[in-house]
Amino acid sequence: MSIKKTYEEINEKIRSGKAVVLTAEEVSVMGRELSPAEIVKKVDVVTTATFGAMCSSGAFINFGHADPPIRMEKIRLNGVPVYEGLAAVDTYVGATACDPEKPEYGGAHVIQDLVEGKELELEAWGKGTDCYPRKYIKTRISKETVNEMFLFNPRNAYQNYNVAVNTTDTIKYTYMGSLLPNLRNATYSTSGELSPLLNDPEFRTIGMGTRIFLGGAEGYVSWPGTQFNTSKPKNEHGVPVSNSATLAVIGDLKQMSSDYLQAAYYEKYGVSLFVGIGIPIPVLDEDMARRLTIRNEQIETTVLDYGTVGTPALGRVNYEQLRSGQIKVNGKKVRTAPVSSLSKARKIANLLKEQVQQGSFELVKPVMMFPKNTSLNGLKEEGGES
C-alpha cells in the first residue's frame, strides 16, 4: 500500500524534531538509488531555492505624516522616482525605477540601502490642499523611521527560463547580461534541480499562503505571479521547456538581509534586484517524491536568439549541459555562464533545511491552489500586428 502523509503529520514531526529534511540536490542524488516509494518513507521535507535577478520586484513604504502634512504627488528617494499614486504618504518603490540621468542607481539600490539600515534622502512635492497644506518636504528616512516597509514582488521565481544567445555581428546588452556577437557566449538562469517550481511543476503544494524564505526572512506566496503561464510545452518529465509559471510573494522588508536581497546594474540595460527565495516542499506521496528527484539532465530549456527580432528558438539543451560550461548551438560550441547564483541558492536551501529541522519553520498548506490552464495575451498596436 502506498504511503500518504498530511501537512499536520509532517508539522508534528517538525515540532518534535523528528522530521527528515533534505535539499532538492540531496534528494536528486538519493533518487538514483531509491524508488519514490522508498523516498516517501525516508524523507518528510525537501528544501528548494533560487537566487537571481527578478525585475518585477519592489516595496511598499509608509513614511508617516509631517506637521503640517503633505499629500505627496511627486516623490524621490535618493533621487530615484518612486510611485506616488497611493495615499498621502504611501509609496511603491519599483526595483527597476531610476533617474535617467543616473541609470546605475535605482529602486533596487534604494531597497538594499533601506534593508542595510542606511539613511536616504526623501523629497516630495504636492499641490497643497485644505487638509494637506504643505507643498514640499525634504528630509531623511530609514527603516527605523518609516512605519511599514514590506516587499511585494509581482513576478518572481520563474518556472524555468530560456537560454540567451546572440547570432548577430554586434554585442547585445540585455537583462540576461551582455551577449557577445556570433554565438560567443550563452547565458542562463534558474538553479536547475534546486529551483522551487521545477520540483513542484503541477503546483500541488505551492499556492496562496505557502510560507517561504524570502530575502533572508519569512515570507509568503500571495498570488500567482504575473505572466503565470501553464500552457508552455513540457518535456517527457513534465517540466516546461521555457519560462512558464511565476509567483507573487510578500514579506516584511525590515526583517530581510542584503545577503539575500541585492541590487544589480546591467550595462546599457538597467537596474534589477537579485532575490533569494527558498520553498520547503512536503513529501506527501510517491508522486511528489518522483517530482522531487528531478535531475539537471532531465530539465530542458530553449535556446533563444536575443539578437534577432522575434527571438527565434535555436534548439533545446538541459541543465547538465549548461553547467558543463559549454553547449552546442547551430553546430558551434558556445561557452555558458549563469546569471543567477547557484552557490547562493545552495546556501538558502541549506539554511531553510536547518530552520525546518530546528522546528522554527513549519509548513503552511495553501489556502488557495493556482489555476491549471492559463495562457498569455500580448499587446496589439492599433492598426498593426501584435
Image (cartoon, helix red, strand yellow):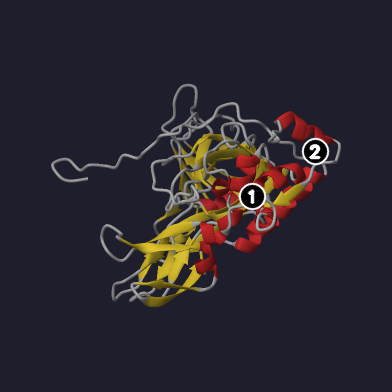
Check residue 5 in the rendering and tell me which mark sits there, or answer none: none
Residue at which label 1 appears: 48
Report helix, strand or loop for mark 1. Answer: strand
Q: Foreground: 134 or 97?
A: 97
Say which quadrant the N terminus sits in: top right
- Left or right, residue 244 beside residue 110: left
Rendered image quadrant of residue 260: bottom right
The first of marks 2 and 1 along the sequence is 2
Three-letter amino acid code at disc 2? Ile
Q: Residue at x 56, y 39 (%)?
A: 249
In the rendered view, would you say 127 is above or below 291? above
Residue at the extreme front:
1
Instruction: Give the amino acid type for the residue marked by disc 1 in the picture.
Output: Thr
Q: CA distance from mark 2 to mark 1?
A: 17 Å
For the point 66% across and 54% down, which residue is it?
A: 31
What residue did someone put label 2 on?
14
